[in-house]
Image (tube, grey):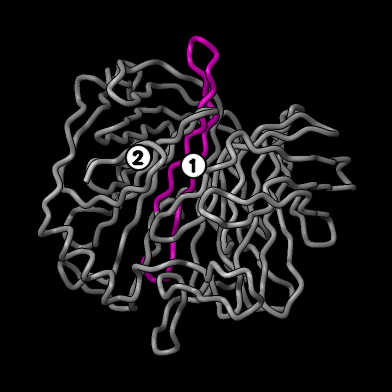
Amino acid sequence: MKNRKDSDTTKHSSQTTHSGQKSDSGELRVQDLGRHHHSSRIITASVMLFVMILLTCGVYFSFFDSSNETKASNVSPLFHSEERKVYDPVLPDKAVKLPADFQLHPDFQHEWWHYFASVVDADGQEYGIQWSYFRVATDERETSGWQSPQLYIANVVISSGTTTWKEQRLARGGIGQAGMRNRPFRIWLDNWSWRSLSSTPFPGLLDVQSDEFGMVLTSKTIGPYVLNGDKGYQIKHDLLPIASYSFSAPFLSVQGQLRLEGQPAFAVKGKAWLNKEWGSALLAEGRRGWDWFVFDLDDGRTLSVTQSRHDQQLPYTYGTLADRSGKVISLSDSDISITPLNTSTLPNGRRLPLQWSIEVPESNIKLMTKVVRRDMWLPFVIPYWEGPVSASGSHEAKGFMQLTGY
């Protein structure tokens, strides 16, 4: 099953490649993409078996009801904790600690990494890069091998102003196809990986290869890590028991190579942002979805804002404002004003609010957003809209927007 631009592809393969080597300075060095690009091999029987496994688990269907009518959300069991399953709770008296919490947390039901990068090539052409890595436990067993309850999903999206390349892969845990090692740091699914030479992700090498595109990107921290919420404990609603652990690396420089549709690899560089979150029952009954924004402001600060939507409850908004000096302002619902300004109909018929007003009055921030490319709907196992945005107003800004539940 080959990936095509502007089309969804779900792949299952066992091929592994490597694209980094140690330099004299001890950092990972990018090699020429062309040297290690291999065609992905897909075994039809394995695909059928894996899809059957997902169907059996109740995973392989849409995340939310696509209807515009007001009714209870059709939340996928992929993120919904059933009563008979017991996972570790998210507690307010436990702070996130680094580097310890770079590792996986298999006692919690869900865990994911999100990486966004805005890069340019030598001609000034801009590209948005999105990489997501999910771990989901189907039950609380601590078994290994084929009995492992862990499932892994990885998404990659590259976009220009006119074209989108995207692909998704899925794998089960316990058999070496996907997972994490902490010393040195490495998370992988098939031949897609993020790795470094230390126990932390940075400096780190993101290596993704598919039939239609590829990238090898080195990311380095140029500012501090940020613990979201209260020392990493992030409340997601003031009236509902929903919370997670979360931290980010919002100050990253990135450089490397992209390969698109058989063209020679070319160099890119820019800025990037990484977030990690984990918890249990993050999509409780009645949660409709969320609207999530991350921005690099022209004054050097970074802003993250999330609006969480629920049935029979007002939306709840929270966020984080940080600068390179280490100053972090945790934002709650009363600190943020977020308003959709314009609703657009996508080619698939879905209606989404693609233009927003975001204000943080106490910090003199007033932004109006604009999408770079309107048709960034990602029809993956969990479908959502995600893509690059710009903003103007009190500041000029670039960033990314993620909309779920529409």
Question: Mark 2 Cα within 10 Å, few/some/many (few <14, many 20+)?
Answer: many
The correct choice, above or below, for 237 with respect to 193 in the image is below
Instruction: Give 46 or 215, whichever is nearer the viewer.
Output: 46
> Is residue 121 inside the magenta stretch?
yes
Mark 2, secondary structure of its residue: strand
Magenta stretch: helix, strand or loop mostly? strand
> For the view shown, which residue lies furthest in the top direction?
123
Q: Which amino acid does label 1 sit on?
A: Tyr
Mark 1, secondary structure of its residue: strand
Q: In the drawing, what numbered circle is on residue 115? A: 1
x and y percent of residue 47 in the render? 17, 58
> Is residue 73 inside the magenta stretch?
no
Residue in the image at 50% along x and 28% along y: 160
x and y percent of residue 299 in the render? 77, 28
Viewed as shown, does residue 75 lie left or right of 44? right
Residue 238, located in which quarter of the rendered image? bottom right
| Residue on which disc 2 sits | 194
x and y percent of residue 288 in the render? 61, 70
Which stretch did the figure color magenta? 106-133
Instruction: Give 288 or 352, whichever is nearer the viewer.
Output: 352
Quarter in which the C terminus is drawn: bottom right
Residue in the image at 29% along x and 49% along y: 181
